[in-house]
Amino acid sequence: MTFPPSSTDPSTSAASSSHQHQTTQQQHPGLETLDTKTSDESTPKQHSPQGISIPKCLQDAKIATLPSTAYYIPNFISPEEEDALLHKVSTAPKPRWKQLTHRRLQTWPSDLVNNKLIDAPLPTWLTDPVITRLMSIPVYSYDDKNLFVESPHKQPNHVLINEYPSGIGIMPHKDGAAYHPVVCTVSLGASLCLNIYQSKEDGALDPQPAFRILQEPRSLLITTDDLYTEFLHGIADIYEDTNLSETTVANWNLLRSSWSFKDGTNRRDIRTSLTYRDVIKVSNLGNKLGMFSKR
Ligand SMILES: O=C(O)CCC(=O)C(=O)O
């Protein structure tokens, strides 16, 4: 990550509580609902799994109010898949965690060294279902090319896992030259707003976000093009997102549960994000030394 000199990180103390699944969803045109388990008439309705909704192509999930380009898919994974991912994250071996001042993170398969990744496979729990599902969505309806068709390794090879307690965010930054400029973020556990910032003419950061994207648990947000290269992104260190409405949230019409923010607020809870990217430079040193095996 590269941070502009004008950025600050006014971190505050953490508060935590458990997350809850929201069970009501909005159905959007172009999204098809897939049940993640086979239907069983004998299963009581309250136990039936909530479906996932995958667009036929990314254009159906485009955030139209943003400069190029971002896509938002609210029901990208199911509640069961969310729970399984959170379990894997929370039970990862302790050395996997890097503790920062107010949040902690994991990097898979490993940290970058001089912007380079040591070649190693991602564990299966990080590739399936997220990468397999992501790769199955074409960008346009008229051909089957996915978002990574032009990336060096044709799919994400790196995942950063960030855990944000309530009240904690990440300062405005650009992701830099180490990655192919496509960022896919799966949100788990709770909702929060990602702020998009612009630099002013004198090069200093405009502290007022130009846009806000509300990320719900189980959603996928994809940012690319100018949103990667020209704009900065960050998350405010606040306990509550306020003034939420269709005029202030760029992806309001794509949200699963816009009704739940109708009082204009989102009380933050622990939110975990999985950020999938393709690291451009990969060294095969790890393979030569037999350092990594698939877990
Ligand atoms: O957690 C997020 O949604 C943002 C993470 C981020 O900005 C980054 O990994 O560069």
Image (tube, rainbow, N blue to C red):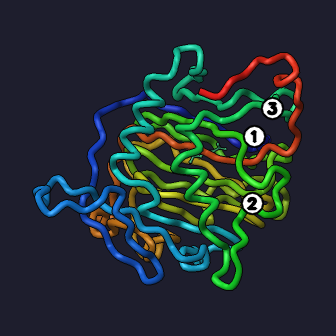
Q: Is disc 3 placed on a helix, strand or loop?
A: loop
Q: Pointer 3 and pointer 1: residues touching (CB < 8 Å)?
A: no
Q: Relative to residue 184, is residue 245 drawn left or right?
A: left
- Mark toward the start of the polypeptide (2 vs 1): 1
Crowd tier of the residue under label 1, counting other residues whose Cα lies within 10 Å: few below 14, some 14–19, many 20 or above: few
Three-letter code for the amino acid on which mark 2 is drawn = Phe
- Mark toward the start of the polypeptide (3 vs 1): 1
Q: Position of residue 98 (x, y in %)?
A: 60, 21
Give the labeled residue for mark 3: 119
Q: CA distance from mark 3 to mark 2?
A: 18 Å
Three-letter code for the amino acid on which mark 3 is drawn = Asp
Q: Is disc 2 placed on a helix, strand or loop?
A: loop
The image shows residue 194, relative to residue 138, as above or below, that is above
Give the labeled residue for mark 2: 148
Ligand 1 has an atom within 8 Å of the beta carbon of the residue at disc 2: no
Give the labeled residue for mark 1: 1
- Residue in the image at 64% along x and 39% along y: 159
Q: Position of residue 221 (x, y in %)?
A: 56, 59
- Residue in the image at 65% along x and 28% along y: 294
Crowd tier of the residue under label 2, counting other residues whose Cα lies within 10 Å: few below 14, some 14–19, many 20 or above: many
